[in-house]
Amino acid sequence: MILPAASTRLVRLSRRADFERVLGAGASAIAARSPHFVLHHLPNTDELSDELSTGGHPEGALPVDVFRPAARELLVGVVIPKRWARRAVTRNLLKRQMYAAFARHAPALPGGMWVVRLRAAFDRERFPSADSKALRRVVRSEVDALMQAAVRQRAGRAG
């Protein structure tokens, strides 16, 4: 009997070195692009496999048929340069939208470090308010499409 895997945990990246590691990994780390965002992914190299072992059974260990993988962690970060979002209200809105998108798509995303980066400004004539419902809708739909594209691309590489 295999118990369901523990849920996916989101952990926010906070160290500069972690951001540099993901963003400095080059073009191979780019999971998806959209008109305003780039999504970078650096898979865990030391992540344990979810497959069952056929090796020996140490004393006191759980039997193989009740194996339960540990919680899967996604290390996520957001980069919003002032160059592309001048107003703090807009930067905060974008960060909230991106972290919410990571939470919505976490079960489908493979483990590792994920960083989404704003790469172009939103048109101020189209979105004059720094925090409007229209801007929220556009950002949400674009980031959701970005995450879905990343899931499809990473699934294509694995399969």
Image (cartoon, helix red, strand yellow):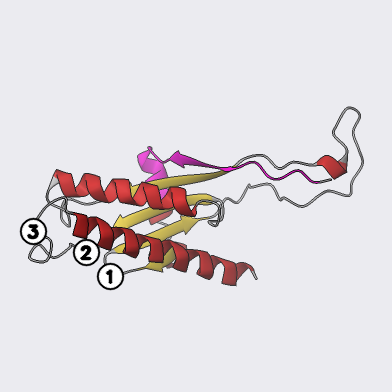
Residue 127 in sight from this viewpoint: yes
Q: Position of residue 35 (x, y in %)?
A: 28, 70
Res. 120 mark? 2
Q: Is residue 116 above or below residue 34?
A: above
Q: SS for tag 2?
A: loop
Relative to 71, is 143 on the left or the right? Answer: left
Real-space Cα separation, disc 2 to disc 3, in angstroms = 16 Å
| Magenta stretch bounds | 2-21
Real-space Cα separation, disc 3 to disc 1, in angstroms = 19 Å
Amino acid at the residue labelled 1: Pro
Amino acid at the residue labelled 3: Pro
Question: Which residue is label 3 attached to?
Answer: 128
**Closer to the observer: label 2 or label 3?**
3
Q: N-terminal of the two: label 2 or label 3? A: 2
Amino acid at the residue labelled 2: Ala
Q: SS for tag 3?
A: loop
